[in-house]
Amino acid sequence: MEEQALILKCQSGDSCAFEELLGKYEKMIYSLTYRYFGNHEDACDVGQEAMIRIYRKIIEFNGNSSFKTWLYRVVVNLCLDELRRRKHQSTSLEEIGEKGYEPVSGELGPVENYENLEKATLIQEILGTLSEEHRTILILKEIEGLDYNEISSVLNCNIGTVKSRLNRARDSFRRKLSERPRYNILAEGRLQA
Amino acid sequence: MNCDLIRKNLGEYLDGEVSSTLQIEIKDHLKNCATCCAEHEELFQMHDILQLEPVTPPAGFGGAWRERIRNEASVKEEVATNNVVSLSNKTKKALKWYQQVPTWAAAAVILVVGVFFGLKQSLWQTSGADELSYSASQVDEGATYQLKILMVGTRSKEVQKILRDFSSSHEGGMAFTLRVQQKETAVFPGLALDEAKMLQEQLTKAGAKVKIIQE
């Protein structure tokens, strides 16, 4: 069934259609929540909450943006809400970082897989130290690969804001990356390859 | 284009979000400027390191959210059913109430409507120049009128002055006191219609309520 037809069925309250539709985006949603929280436990909890929120809000989807962009908006907002809630509960971003970042398993060989795990863990660590604003825009642009228009739609801001925020976020990420000794090892490995 | 401008646009250049003209300019500049080229290389490395594969959810994730959606759907359905039931009960109660009191409700409505129209009719006859002209049209040309004050209002001194002045120029005028504002007080009998209307106009402007009655 086409996506448009599935969305209409979801909006009329068909939960089976919802499972079919969101099944296609399950990995994207999980991955996005993982990038915010850096561990599977939180990603599972927030990912499930995201599904519930989408289920409740899908009636509001009016087709002004693509469904995927709309999903990003709902999930990003949920992640930010959760981060703020935790912040209010005196759990700083640093403390979340200290909780540890679980390595993400991949499907590559042992050596490549190890390098990828190292890299992924390092990135999660750095993302965890960035402000919500910088973390969000880097996740959307660099990891999720959205273009400027899509990001402006997800974040409900203009293209100019996207550009300037992205520049600042990249500067901040680069600074923090260069401070990590492990980065140099990874960079050397990449250059040799 | 200078180095500052080039560096400012390097991010957009990397993302492929610059115009084709700017893209050519930046590309040419990078060939000849080692500093900007190094900056671009660093930016590219960061971009490269951030290229991560999507995270595969653990085995239980799919089942967990699907179960929660099913629960949510069943709760939603239950709430909807309860709403229908409660609405139905409310409707029944409303109908029951209506059936129990039709007689007194109808009587009350009739009473309220009757009082409202009666009051309106009374006011219509006793206030304003337009109402007077309606009354005047019902009487003879040679008839005489009596002006009564129904209520003096808050500007009693002004009203008294008007009455005193009128009294001094009107032979048949009678002296009076305004002790009780709410009391209907006969003031001037034997007035021609024009005189009565003129006095009424002055008194109304001063905030009093007056009535002209044909004698």
Image (cartoon, rainbow, N blue to C red):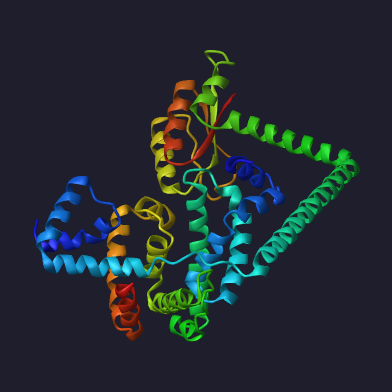
Residue at left 57%, top 21%? B135
Quarter in which the C terminus of chain B is drawn: top right
Left or right, B11 with respect to A38, comes to left
Relative horizontal placement of residue B88, taking residue A162 as reference (left or right): right
Residue at 17% x, 55% y is: B27
Q: Nearer the viewer, residue A158 or B83?
A: A158
> Which corner quadrant holds the N terminus of chain B?
bottom left
Residue B15, percent from left and from top: 30, 56
- Tell me if I can see residue B85 in this picture: yes
| Residue at the image position 13 percent from the left and 69 percent from the top | B35
- Count of marks overlaid on the render: 0
Horizontal and vertical percent position of residue B57 = 59, 67
Is residue B195 or residue B96 the one in the foreground?
B96
Q: Quadrant of residue A138?
A: bottom left
Residue B107: x and y in percent read 83, 37
Seen in the picture, residue B129 relative to A15 is either above or below; the reply is above
Query: In this image, A138 relative to A98: left or right?
Result: left
Return the residue found at the far top. B141
* Residue drawn at point x = 89 percent, y = 45 percent: B96
Q: Considering only vertical position in the picture, is B157 above or below B187?
A: below
Choose between A10 and B177: the one closer to the eye: A10
Residue B87 located left or right of residue B27: right
Q: Is residue A169 visible?
A: no
Where residue A80 appears, as percent x and y from the top left, is 48, 68
